[in-house]
Amino acid sequence: MSRRGLLRGAGLAAAGTAAGAFGLPELERRFGWDHPPLSGGYAAADDNEGAVGTSSVRVRYFVETSRAQVALTFDDGPAPRYTPQFLDVLDEARIPATFFLVGRNVRDHAGLVADRLGRHEVGNHSWAHRDLATLDLRAIQDDVRRTHAVIRERLGRTPTLLRPPYGHLGGSTVLAADSFGYDLVLWDRQMHERRFAGNPAGQAGDIVGTVRPGSIILAHDAGDRRRLVALGALRDIVKGVQARGFEFVTVSELIAGADVPSTPAAQSR
């Protein structure tokens, strides 16, 4: 039974009954859930006494803007096999991107990107790509702090954005991001590497045909050979998106160009 099916209608009640009868570890075994919907993550109220922030953290998966701008983002690097190749294409096209970096990869491979980030933005993507939604506030803060420090030390950049691995977002992740003054960034368009395996033209068409003003596009510059689909599609994506009249910007530039909502006072004038 799928998680989606189980959560629908009577299935939701069944899940509650099962949880009472078997406990969460047994649910994981029976239904193959890595993170059952009834467990995993920490509500903000569980540990907010350890949070010191501004209460102004924003969570963005796209940006409301009237400008024809989109942001291309890459997760999980830097990595020797693919990161330089993605940078080559971006340099050729003379467009910026935002790289959400894994701390231990920065520690091991900073030299791959240290002199190639001029037009690009750098974000925090955790130290070792653990699921932050399963950690408490202190553990997330330590993880994010360690990554923040190595990015500053090895790359001379100060990140202001956090993308949680897998896009999993728990309350404690929000608190940790706020304590660093980070905004949280997800995405509204992504490379479907399994769907378009061996079909970079299909991948390019999917992105080109669906982006909208303010889109944040997810890709990866580390991992297995599936990443070659995104790499093979990247030139056509750039050309196709630009042909539709869009400009590529960093995530922070996209946010800076967001439309300012009208206030009731402004509307009444």
Image (tube, rainbow, N blue to C red):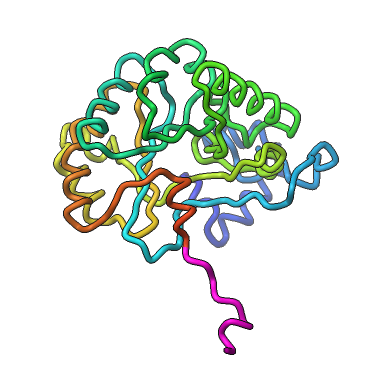
The percent coordinates of residue 215 (x first, y second) are 37, 53
Instruction: Locate residue 128: give its quadrant.
Output: top right
Farthest-out residue, top = 108
Q: Nearer the viewer, residue 248 or 233?
A: 248
Taking the image as shown, residue 10 lies to the left or right of residue 110, namely: right
Taking the image as shown, residue 93 lies to the left or right of residue 127, namely: left
At x 45% / y 15%, what residue is drawn?
Answer: 110
Instruction: Locate residue 202: give its quadrant.
Output: top left
Magenta stretch: includes residue 156: no
Q: Which image quadrant: the C terminus? A: bottom right
Q: Nearer the viewer, residue 222 or 93?
A: 93
Taking the image as shown, residue 170 lies to the left or right of residue 55, namely: left
At x 67% / y 50%, what residue is drawn?
Answer: 16
Is most of the magenta stretch helix, strand or loop?
loop
At x 68% / y 30%, what residue is drawn?
Answer: 140
How many numbered marks are there? 0
Farthest-out residue, bottom = 268
Taking the image as shown, residue 166 lies to the left or right of residue 212, namely: right
The span picked out in magenta is 259-269
At x 42% / y 18%, what residue is drawn?
Answer: 114
Q: Nearer the viewer, residue 61 or 213?
A: 213
The percent coordinates of residue 69 (x first, y second) are 34, 55
The percent coordinates of residue 158 (x first, y second) are 56, 30
**Residue 105 vertical position relative to residue 187 in the rendered view, above or below:** above
**Residue 161 vertical position relative to residue 245 in the rendered view, above or below:** above
The percent coordinates of residue 77 (x first, y second) are 41, 23
Magenta stretch: includes residue 262: yes
Q: Nearer the viewer, residue 112 or 115?
A: 115
